[in-house]
Amino acid sequence: MATGEEQPGKKPEVVVITGASAGVGRATVRAFARRGAHIGLLARGADGLEAARSEVEEAGGKALVVPTDVSDSDKVEEAAEKIERELGPIDTWINNAMVSVFSPFREMTPDEFKRVTEVTYLGYVWGTMAALKRMLPRDRGVVVQVGSGLAYRAIPLQSAYCGSKHAIQGFTEAVRSELIHDGSNVHITMVQLPAVNTPQFGWVKSRLPRKPQPVPPIYQPEVIAEGIYWAAHHRRRELNIGFSTSAVIALNKVAPGIGDLYLGKTGYESQQYDGLDVDRPDNLWAPVPGDHGAHGDFDDRAHNSSPQLWLNTHRALIGGVIAGLLATGLAAALLKRRTASP
């Protein structure tokens, strides 16, 4: 398993990123490219993939564009085979590709629900399957599932997407347990995201009366990308990003009924703003042409950092500081007691 930034003479890390053309995937491509990784780029949108490839190469890395609809297990397997043939053994596989529909469940069609599930859930299953097929015989490698706070606490108007994130959570726990049983050194982790400023809100299929938006607080995709990079190089079972994510997950474990009531009252309004884009294209069945980059339309409302993420990824340091302060306090108390004794 790769352990950090590239060093002179060290073999470049080989990474696969699904949904690499835009949003969180695109920002993650940039994060790994800065560290000299060689990256297999999987997505449907050719324009975004080629732009991502250029960014990797400009950073000094090597990229392989493999246009892939991750709902097709055969295509995912073919992509993995091609990447290993041209870039070398895969060290890290990041499942990130997704589609969604903003719609009340009663208005969803079976085909729409099936499509979201096949991409957003089964795409992760096929990616994990292709990765483990190669990693297990080598007894090394990392699979990162890009999840969401919605894997624990679902919200209205995204029933298919939330269902998929819940499914990924359960699937990942099952696979992790099997790896532990087998004594494997292959690691699987899940990164739970907050609301993120990505282009998806401009191309997700929507039946909402107004424009869809992420539920605040919103974070920039670069914050998420750094968390994903960290998770790929540390053996943490799960990584939450953002205080909102941790708070929602914790509250849902204690009082899920409160979440039901609160979201039933606020969940529709909080996911909408301004007016509706009339007849805008969506990417449910085919990619929206063009290079859409990493950011959406919410730069003015998005946070560029997460103190919670820093705290979460520096537990050992924080624990050491606390232990040191406690030891100092204890020593001072003992000294005071001794000097006070007759």
Image: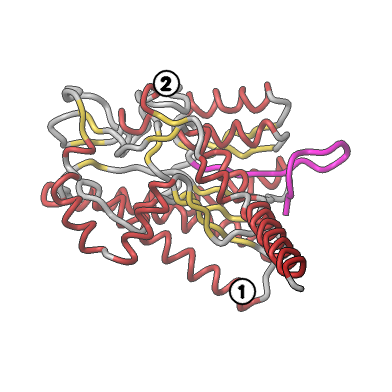
Say left or right for 240 vs 160: right
Q: Earlier in the sequence, mark 2 or mark 1?
A: 1
Along the viewing direction, whichever of 12 and 309 lies nearer the viewer: 309
Q: Is residue 25 visible?
A: no
Q: Main secondary structure of the magenta part?
A: loop
Say left or right for 108 vs 302: left
Name, please, the residue furthest toward the bottom: 181
Name, please, the residue furthest toward the front: 342
Residue 304 counted in the magenta span: no
Say left or right for 167 vs 237: left
On screen, residue 291 above or below 66: above
On screen, residue 67 above or below 236: above
> Which SS class for mark 2?
loop
In the picture of the structure, the residue carrying the numbered disc 2 is 290
Please state which amino acid type lies under the numbered disc 2.
Gly
- List x then y, in percent, for residue 312: 56, 51
User: What is the span of residues highlighted in magenta in the rendered image?
Assistant: 1-18
Image quadrant where residue 182 sits: bottom right
- List x then y, in percent, for residue 116: 31, 48
In the picture of the structure, the residue carrying the numbered disc 1 is 180
Please state which amino acid type lies under the numbered disc 1.
Ile
Spatial CA distance of label 2 from label 1 is 43 Å
- List x then y, in percent, for residue 100: 30, 43
Along the viewing direction, whichever of 16 and 250 lies nearer the viewer: 250
Q: Where the C terminus falls, by quadrant?
A: bottom right
